[in-house]
Image (cartoon, rainbow, N blue to C red):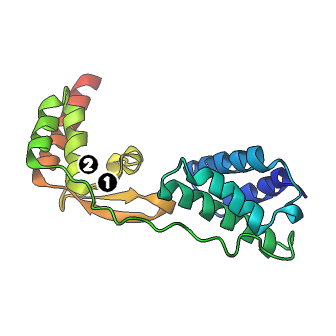
C-alpha cells in the first residue's frame, strides 16, 4: 500500500470520527506535502530516519508550531496504519515535537476596542463586534449561531465550538441592546 492509498483510508476513518472539514483540509495539505517530498512510497518503506529528514528540511522555513503540526499529522497517520495492521511497526513513534516558546496572549486595550466600535458601519457589524468581544467566541462559532441559541433572559448563548463541542457563553447587557437593535432593524426591513 502506498501513501496515497493510506491517505484515502485515513481520511475516511477521520470523517467517520467526525473530524471537521477544516481539520481534514489541513491534513490533505499535509499529505500532499509529504508525498511531494518523499514520493508516493510504499508505506513499509517509510522509516523514522526518512521522516526525520523530511521534517529537518521543513524546519528551516517553518515556525516551531507549524513544524509541530506536521509532526502530529505524521504520528497520527502512521499510528492509524499501525493500529489498522497495515504496518507491523510505527515509524513515527519516536518523533518529538520542537520545544515551543511560551507566548503571552495578545489582547486588545480599551483604545483598540473604541476604535473598532467607531469603525463599525452598520448595526449588524456593531452587534457582531459586541458579541465577539463580550463572549470571547471564535468567528467560526458565531457563524453557526441561530436566533434560537440565544437566551435573552440570562444573556447567554449556546455555541458549537471546535470538535462539535457545545458550550454556553454569556454576553453583556450592552451586547444584548445591540443584538436587539439589529434584530428590530432586520424585522423592519422585511416588512
Q: SS class of the residue under badge 1? A: loop
Q: Is residue 32 visible?
A: yes
Residue at the spot x=10%, y=40% of the render?
Answer: 114
State the image quarter where residue 177 is shown: top left
- The tag on residue 132 is 2
Question: Mark 2 to mark 1: distance in Å?
Answer: 5 Å
Residue at the spot x=87%, y=62% of the render?
Answer: 45
Q: Quadrant of the N terminus?
A: bottom right
Q: SS class of the residue under badge 2? A: helix
Residue at the spot x=78%, y=75% of the render?
Answer: 83
Q: Position of residue 173 (x, y in %)?
A: 11, 53
Q: Earlier in the sequence, mark 2 or mark 1?
A: 2
Front residue of this view, candidates 1 and 103:
103
Q: Is residue 16 visible?
A: no
Crowd around label 1: few <14 · some 14–19 · many ≥20 (10 Å): some
Residue at the spot x=8%, y=43% of the render?
Answer: 111
Amino acid at each position: 500500500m502506498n501513501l496515497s492509498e493510506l491517505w484515502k483510508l485515513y481520511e475516511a476513518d477521520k470523517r467517520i470520527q467526525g473530524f471537521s472539514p477544516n481539520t481534514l483540509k489541513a491534513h490533505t495539505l499535509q499529505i500532499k506535502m509529504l508525498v511531494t517530498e518523499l514520493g508516493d512510497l510504499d508505506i513499509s518503506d517509510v522509516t523514522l530516519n526518512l521522516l526525520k529528514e523530511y521534517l529537518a528540511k521543513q524546519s528551516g522555513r517553518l515556525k516551531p508550531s507549524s513544524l509541530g503540526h506536521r509532526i502530529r499529522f505524521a504520528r497520527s497517520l502512521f499510528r492509524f496504519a499501525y493500529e489498522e495492521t497495515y504496518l507491523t511497526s510505527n515509524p513515527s513513534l519516536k518523533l518529538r515535537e520542537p520545544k515551543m516558546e511560551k507566548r503571552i496572549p495578545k489582547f486588545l486595550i480599551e483604545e483598540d476596542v473604541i476604535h473598532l466600535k467607531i469603525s463599525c458601519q452598520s448595526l449588524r457589524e456593531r452587534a457582531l463586534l459586541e458579541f465577539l468581544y463580550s463572549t470571547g467566541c471564535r468567528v467560526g462559532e458565531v457563524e453557526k449561531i441561530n436566533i434560537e441559541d440565544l437566551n435573552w433572559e440570562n444573556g447567554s448563548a449556546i455555541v458549537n465550538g471546535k470538535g462539535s463541542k457545545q458550550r454556553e457563553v454569556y454576553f453583556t447587557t450592552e451586547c444584548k441592546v445591540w443584538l436587539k437593535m439589529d434584530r428590530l432593524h432586520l424585522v423592519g426591513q422585511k416588512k
